[in-house]
């Protein structure tokens, strides 16, 4: 299992619209992406807002297949483009669990 941590910095005035679009329009699970959790930074950099998602994939090949499928889906492209338009910055990290991690 691998995990992808995406930290999105969103301007304060776009926060609610970003979360609503994420929740109501993006079919993030359509191609096998699993959301482990979603958080908002409450101590630390506050402006722009930081929203962090943690995604689970079976392996790097699974993530690659999901990315390729999304890239061919016009509805997904439209929604992701809408979300990206509200970003100030996004940081992506691909991580593998260590032995002490409760997530394997």
Image (cartoon, helix red, strand yellow):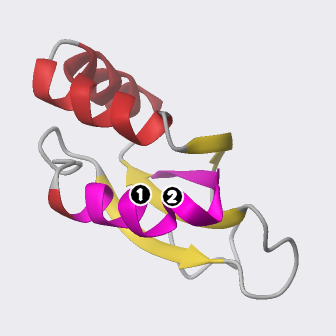
- The residue located at (25%, 23%) in the rendering is 77
The dot on residue 71 is none
Q: Residues within 10 Å of mark 2 (few under 14, many from 20)?
A: some
Q: Is residue 63 left or right of residue 32?
A: right
The residue lying toward the viewer, choosing from 9 and 66, is: 9
Q: Quadrant of residue 87?
A: top right
Alpha carbon separation for disc pair 2 and 1: 6 Å
- The residue located at (14%, 20%) in the rendering is 73
- The residue located at (78%, 67%) in the rendering is 47
Q: Which residues are magenta?
A: 1-23
Q: Quadrant of residue 40?
A: bottom right
Look at the numbered discs 2 and 1 and tell me whether their residues touch, using CB distance below 8 Å: yes
Residue at image mark 1: 18
The dot on residue 14 is 2
> x%, y% of residue 93?
68, 44
Q: Is residue 34 left or right of residue 85?
A: left
The residue lying toward the viewer, choosing from 28 and 34, is: 28
The image shows residue 25, relative to residue 62, as above or below, that is below
> x%, y% of residue 34?
29, 58
> x%, y% of residue 55?
44, 56
Q: Residues within 10 Å of mark 1 (few under 14, many from 20)?
A: many
The residue lying toward the viewer, choosing from 48 and 95, is: 48
Secondary structure at numbered mark 2? helix
Secondary structure at numbered mark 1? helix
Q: Is residue 18 magenta-colored?
A: yes
């Amino acid at each position: 299992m691998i995990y992808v941590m995406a930290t999105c910095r969103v301007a304060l005035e776009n926060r609610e619209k970003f979360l609503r679009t994420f929740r109501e329009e993006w079919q993030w699970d359509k191609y096998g992406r699993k959301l482990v959790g979603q958080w908002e930074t409450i101590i630390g950099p506050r402006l722009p807002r930081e929203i962090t998602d943690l995604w689970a994939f079976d392996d790097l090949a699974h993530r690659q297949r999901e990315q390729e499928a999304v890239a061919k889906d016009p509805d997904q492209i439209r929604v992701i483009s809408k979300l990206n338009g509200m970003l100030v910055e996004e940081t992506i990290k691909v991580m593998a669990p260590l032995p002490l991690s409760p997530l394997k």
